[in-house]
Image (tube, rainbow, N blue to C red):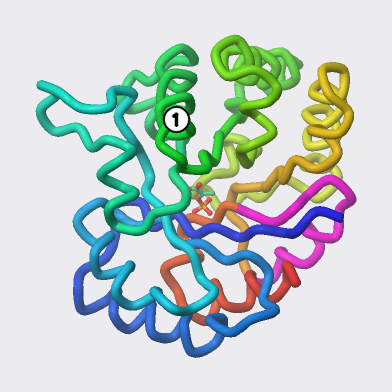
Amino acid sequence: MRKKLVAGNWKMHGSLAENKVLLEALVLELGQASTAGCIVCAPFPYLAQVQSVLSGSTLAWGAQNVSNHAKGAYTGEVSASMLLDFGCSYVIVGHSERRALYGEDDASVAAKFAAAQAAGLIPFLCVGETLEEREAGVTEAVIGRQLDAVLAVSGIEGIGRAVVAYEPVWAIGTGKTASPQQAQAVHAFIRAKLAVLDKNVAASLVIQYGGSVKAANAAELFAQPDIDGGLIGGASLVADEFIAICRAAQ
Ligand code: PEP
């Protein structure tokens, strides 16, 4: 039985004052035992604040990016061990905004994934197709390629210690959610592809859906057999929405 995980990706949003209100609401409503796994991925400068407010609750936290290097002359980069210093358990790698806007290719995503795991972080590996790729009928080929790049470096054993997030690029921040059936079909493809390498890993892997998830559509998405929670962007900034989405995963 897989535990559902809901992670909020704040992207480049927030302030000390706004975060305080949001985090305190999450602790009040979700920070007790027995909730589904609920995680907040905040911008780097706010990780100390997130750690201070969420410590002692059942909520976990993480970052949205990580260097593929352990340390060194890499101005502006943040290493996995630095994230551990602030209590992070998770880090997002390969988000489509990083792939599209910051030139992260499959190889650099695979390197970041490996660096995160080497330090003891759990990566959320984001995969997903663009609208053009979906319309061209190459969704499975694209996601297969994105997974293969990570498999080549970290193996199926590495995937087994991660979370995969299926995030169709056309559904991120657009208000267009994949239908539960569309999402389920891709989740089943991912699980079947990995099952060829290791049935147990595939069966126990948490595969989240991301793309315009909100309180109104979360329950139907999470009811699909291969959808194990969600990676939530915009709605994770609104306390009531995020709390309702986390509850829908229980
Ligand atoms: C995301 O940023 O990963 C995401 C899914 O965003 P949104 O929920 O806003 O579509």
**SS type, badge 1:** helix
Q: Where's residue 17, x and y in %?
A: 21, 79
Q: Where's residue 169, x and y in %?
A: 55, 34
Observer-nearest of 146 and 177: 146
Residue at 33% x, 24% y is 68
Quarter holding the C terminus? Answer: bottom right
Quick check: is the Cβ at mark 1 less than 8 Å away from ligand 1? no
Q: Is residue 135 visible?
A: no
With 43 as the anchor, is 190 left or right in this view?
right
Residue at 83% x, 28% y is 189
Q: Is residue 70 above or below residue 103?
A: below
With 203 as the anchor, is 141 left or right in this view?
left
Q: Which residues are magenta?
A: 215-230
Observer-nearest of 216 and 193: 193
Which amino acid type is shown beneath numbered disc 1? Ala
Q: Quadrant of residue 139?
A: top right
Q: Where's residue 218, x and y in %?
A: 71, 64
Q: Quadrant of residue 187?
A: top right
Residue at 59% x, 30% y is 127
With 147 as the anchor, is 24 left or right in this view?
left
Mark 1 surroundings within 10 Å by alpha-carbon count, few (fewer than 14), some (14 through 19), many (20 or more): some
Residue at 61% x, 60% y is 6
Residue highlighted by disc 1: 118
Q: Is residue 37 visible?
A: yes
Q: Is residue 198 above or below residue 240?
A: above
Observer-nearest of 212 and 194: 194
Quarter holding the N terminus? Answer: bottom right
Is residue 198 shown in magenta?
no
Is residue 219 shown in magenta?
yes
Q: Where's residue 150, x and y in %?
A: 57, 18
With 226 as the anchor, is 242 left or right in this view?
left
